[in-house]
Image: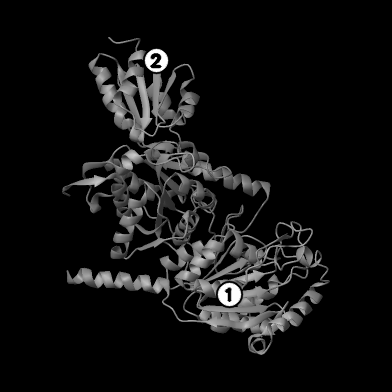
Amino acid sequence: MNKARLMQGNEACTEGALAAGVRFFAGYPITPSTELAELCAEKLPKMGGKFIQMEDEIASMGAVCGASLAGMKAMTATSGPGFSLKQELIGYAAIAELPVVIVNVQRSGPSTGLPTAPAQGDVMQARWGTHGDHGVIALSPGSVREAFDVGVHAVNFAERFRMPVIILLDEVIGHMREKVVLPEQKDIIIFDRKRTTLSPEEFEAYKPDADEVPPMMPFGEGYYHHVTGLMHNHKGQPALDGATTKEVLSRLHTKIERVQDEITLYTEHFLEDAEIVVITYGGSARAALPAVKQAREQGIKVGMLKLITIWPFPKELVQKVTAQAKKVIVPEMNYGQLVGEIERYVGLDKVIPVNRYDGHLFHPDDILVPIIEAAGGAK
Amino acid sequence: MADIEKYLRKSALPHIWCPGCGNGIVLAALLRAIDKLQLDQKKTVIVSGIGCSSRASGYMNFNTVHTAHGRALPFATGIKMANPELNVIVITGDGDSTAIGGNHFIHSARRNIDLTTIIFNNSVYGMTGGQYSPLSPVGSKATTAPYGISERPFDVGNLAIAAGATYVARGTAFHAVQLTDLIVNAIQNKGFSVVDAITQCPISYGRKNKMGSAANMMKWQRDHAVPVNAATKMTPEALKDKFIIGELYRGIAPEYAAEYDKLIERLRVQGGEA
């Protein structure tokens, strides 16, 4: 068994991604994500992998797309302003179906904002940041150990579904140090992108299998094909007709919607008899759980759902755990983002947003007070 | 006559280029260069940006990537780093490489990463209907410069040399045989290579600037191109309004992908000793 280590969230996330097989990293310095680049610069060449510091955020995103095409598991890391800059090529990776992982260690914005302060302001940008429609997977860990696990899952999901996967860390989780025991390499399940069983002559690069995901052949093996950000047919060649467009756009959603349960990662706390349900994620969950426990000590029937998978939004899970709830409290370090989705599936009347957007993380009291109010006062 | 048809993806043809466009001539020069060098088709990757010329990748039967506007070089850098065995050739336009992709252009040159960049330089954004680019000559007209361009253009050859490219050449669609040879040299150079291929856009640039037919535009290329050797004997006054063709620069510098592989090897040996 591995020894316990004191580790930072950014470091754990990097370790998870490397354990899942990432061997290429391209990045550009930006606080509070830079540790991911620094660690990859040190570790990757020792593992036979490649690190490159590109000239800007856009170039970093382009380089990981290229490395992915050449057959490597590839990752980049950034924070708010860099995440904005990467959006066009995240869309490219979505339509060209390139397995890549983008880590966004969220900080307070908009623009340069508060570069070293935590926030969860990029939740909707992760979903809708690039132009056009496509499915998104975004994972948000709530502890250092979860940052490792999410690193593994993100790479696996990217490879399995041939798509960009976003890790939404926040400055709290990214820079926090906790004692963790990481799993041994042999116990980590790793998913590699599917290869084709067809000959180069028969191979069509964008013809999906029954799971709606096309196999992917790396460049350099004689499986000639075209990759483009234009709408394209099964050969990958530009095809701008309505039927092709509808087929491609539908599949960019349904290839993950069909397995939503397998993508949905979460933890449950005291939900069995909960009349008040707190739904939260990431750094906010750190303060929410002690608040829930304190309220329980006061006799309030409150529970908590901590989402790790933010997108695709786990609507059925949220509906299930809130079915008996009288009130649903949604703490977020933003002006109110994921709460919109929760209102959509739970109903406006039940949902109480709790927002902190002053660059500070929640204090448990920030969440305890609304829990007590929702319960009709102190018991 | 080289058999270049085997390098074309016939299912993707006909091409989208206008009658008289010079892009096909530059593409053919590239394919002849690939054939002359007998590059392993399996190990050759074509990466392009966005614009008329960048559509060429789709017509070529290799592993091909039509990336986003200006971003061919970052994609190519990722491909080359991930698999340095691959011959990576970048097709780009004048706007794609020197405006929106300008930062990537100078930094790829600075790294001297082994990529061959062919700039299909027609002085104009053709796909969007004829706007001026950073390589459009002063005084020429474009839809976004109806009174003539007052911005100075880059000399893209000097830009590449100053930024660190180790092979820089200029050719034209008119001098197609020479262009093939320049591309051959560019591919052979182990480092960042640039071939500025001057070509004609009779529809979006030629008409606006009253340059006549495609054939007349090619005659213009013939009459304004000065070979490198001849240029050394000419006065700046005589070279005004002319451009120099041929090999502009050859240098020697460490190549980035190979240097990184040396680092991996060094760490492996050190790890073994520890």
- Locate residue B24 relative to residue B19 in the image: left or right: left
Q: What amino acid does circle 2 point to?
A: Lys
Q: Position of residue A133 (x, y in %)?
A: 57, 42
Q: Position of residue A325 (x, y in %)?
A: 38, 17
Picture residue at 47% right of the left edge, 76% below the top: B191
Q: Give the secondary structure at mark 1.
A: helix
Mark 2 — residue? A326
Q: Position of residue B272 (x, y in %)?
A: 20, 70
- Locate residue A341 relative to residue B25 in the image: left or right: left
Pointers 1 and 2 in contact (CB under 8 A)?
no
Residue A105 falls in which quadrant of the image?
top left
Judge whether A359 appears above or below B188 on screen: above
Q: Could you tell me which chain the residue with mark 1 belongs to?
A: B
Quick one: B155 or B186, which is closer to the camera?
B155
Q: What distance separates the C-alpha of mark 1 from that of mark 2?
A: 71 Å
- Color encoding of the figure: one colour
